Amino acid sequence: MASFVLPAHPKIPKGKKLAVIILDGWGEQVSDEYNAIHVAETPTMDALKNGRPDTWRLVKAHGPAVGLPKEDDMGNSEVGHNALGAGRIFEQGAGLVDTALETGKLFQGSGFKYIQEAFPTGTLHLIGLLSDGGVHSRLDQLQALIKGCAAHGAKRIRLHVLTDGRDVLDGSSLGFVDDLEQTLKEVRASGCDALIASGGGRMEVTMDRYENDWNVVKRGWDAQVLGEAPHKFASATEALKKLKEADPKVNDQYYPPFVIVDEAGQAVGPIVDGDAVVTFNFRADRMVMMAKALEFADFSSFDRVRWPKIKYAGMLQYDGELKLPNHFLVSPPEIDRTSGEYMVKNGISTFACSETVKFGHVTFFWNGNRSGQFSHELEEYVEIPSDSGITFNVAPEMKAILIAEKARDAILSGKFDTVRVNLPNGDMVGHTGDFHATVVGCATADKAVKIILDAVEQVGGMFLVTADHGNAEDMVKRNPKTTKPVLDKNGKLQILTSHTCAPVPIAIGGPGLPKNVRFRKDLPNGGLANVAATTLNLLGFEAPADYEPSLIEVVD
Ligand SMILES: O=C(O)[C@@H](CO)OP(=O)(O)O
Ligand SMILES: [Mn+2]
Ligand SMILES: [Mn+2]
């Protein structure tokens, strides 16, 4: 058994309060009119950067630095917070699924064998996000899964697709539907009856998270399981086109639920007793609620009307603590010995807080996709309810100030050694593609940082401010080489709703920070995984030997 006792840091004393602030979706990019952070008034963050090369730097937050397969994979909250909390780089779901598909192991595992039992007489349903974004799922993996299932005996496959427009450009869903239809055609030619059965936009249908709004999951349930939706079409392509014609404001993220019907008007693929279901997203947060609805006998979050007896597997197991779902096709990364666990085992008390839509980021993701606390005595997790049923450009301040005030009160209470928050604005408002609202959101996040830093000042503490990946710093599609916007065929800017591959800032400071502590210069490629050792050092401990190295040094 690994020992959790950490030696004292030889030079940094214990006992100073530490605030850790994560700005969600806050990267560093060219400072121009498409950078909402640059355009926003951000005096607090500017002051941490300007003229402070020893206590401000950039760290990598995308690609292999956070366990993603490729250098052009943008960062995201799951991999970012996993790295921040765990202090090491784990190969993440995207890469694990790639390997399982390439080696064919996915089709030999116990999870696949389990769903395969339903193939002779039942339908296989595949539910998930349809894009090549690589944050929650990937189209090429879905295509390989469909072909592999057909080759391994699936006779009837039904797709329940969620359109994206958040990790990819808005409007790109039509192309992804075309690609998927092509694969389904090939599979049909091999004798497997494969069709799209239902759909809807990811933010409107199924992919809610952290129980912010169960109506989202219910809309998905009604379409996917019951075969009922307000809109019925002969194909997914027709659905996307007609729904857009009827309401030009509708976008890929927010398509209403629809079902595909046959000539007699019957839904082509409701989920019934004896069927198999796979949720093909590898990322956990936005599939956990659906997984609960599919799997839990005791379930009261909405009226399921019918709870079919199915064989259900997740692409991954989404929650190791809850063992949810029980069956899965690929084993998730085993993110163990996170900094949160070390802190608890070394007597460090923690207060963690965010609003609902980011609450699991500083708890569940931070702790290696583990729900619950390590210690009820030493840890307090506070969730501030998020607005639901709106897009965040309508209320771009979100709950940032309330989160900061909770953190301030926790710091001033003297009860906690460390306080950790996620400020959501740059990310959640950035995803709406509304530039002006994102500017307001970023300015608000900056004000929230100030509230926390003022409290740190009062108690003579320290702070570490960083981000989990980029988003708000880039609101248009650019040519990566020239950084100039890439215009569409009509000469218009293409709004970027997604995350980016930008590095993120990290700043340390506060009256409690020993004067001779500064960022090392010999880790130019440092990334988010280097932050955990840094925070353990600031709290007066040496970091575990196998953690990525600390970003700080003490100069004599
Ligand atoms: O909203 C989400 O699910 C993702 C984007 O797909 O954003 P984040 O990783 O910041 O949570
Ligand atoms: Mn994020
Ligand atoms: Mn995001």
Image (cartoon, grey):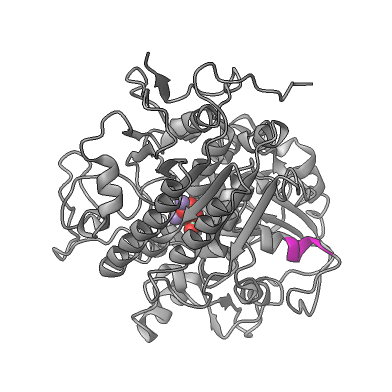
Residue 195, placed above or below residue 143: below
Q: Nearer the viewer, residue 519 or 504?
A: 519
Residue 523, placed above or below residue 198: above
Q: Is residue 295 magenta?
A: yes
Q: Position of residue 192 (x, y in %)?
A: 66, 55
Relative to 455, is 231 on the left or the right?
right
Please, what is the dominant secondary structure of the magenta stretch? helix
Q: Residue at x 35, y 79 (%)?
A: 249
Q: Quadrant of the N terminus?
A: top right
Q: Position of residue 435 (x, y in %)?
A: 26, 65
Considering every residue shown, the one lying at the far top of the view is 556
Residue 168 visible? The answer is no
- In the rendered picture of this protein, how many numbered marks are placed on residues? 0
Q: Quadrant of the C terminus?
A: top left
Q: Is residue 556 magenta?
A: no
Residue 304, placed above or below residue 74: below
Q: Residue at x 60, y 46 (%)?
A: 365
Q: Nearer the viewer, residue 205 or 152?
A: 205
Residue 119 visible? The answer is yes
Residue 372, placed above or below residue 520: below
Q: Position of residue 484 (x, y in %)?
A: 15, 48
Q: Nearer the viewer, residue 143 or 423?
A: 423
Relative to 467, is 538 on the left or the right?
right
Q: Position of residue 323 (x, y in %)?
A: 78, 48
Start-end of magenta stretch: 292-296
Q: Residue at x 42, y 24 (%)?
A: 552
Q: Nearer the viewer, residue 219 or 299?
A: 299
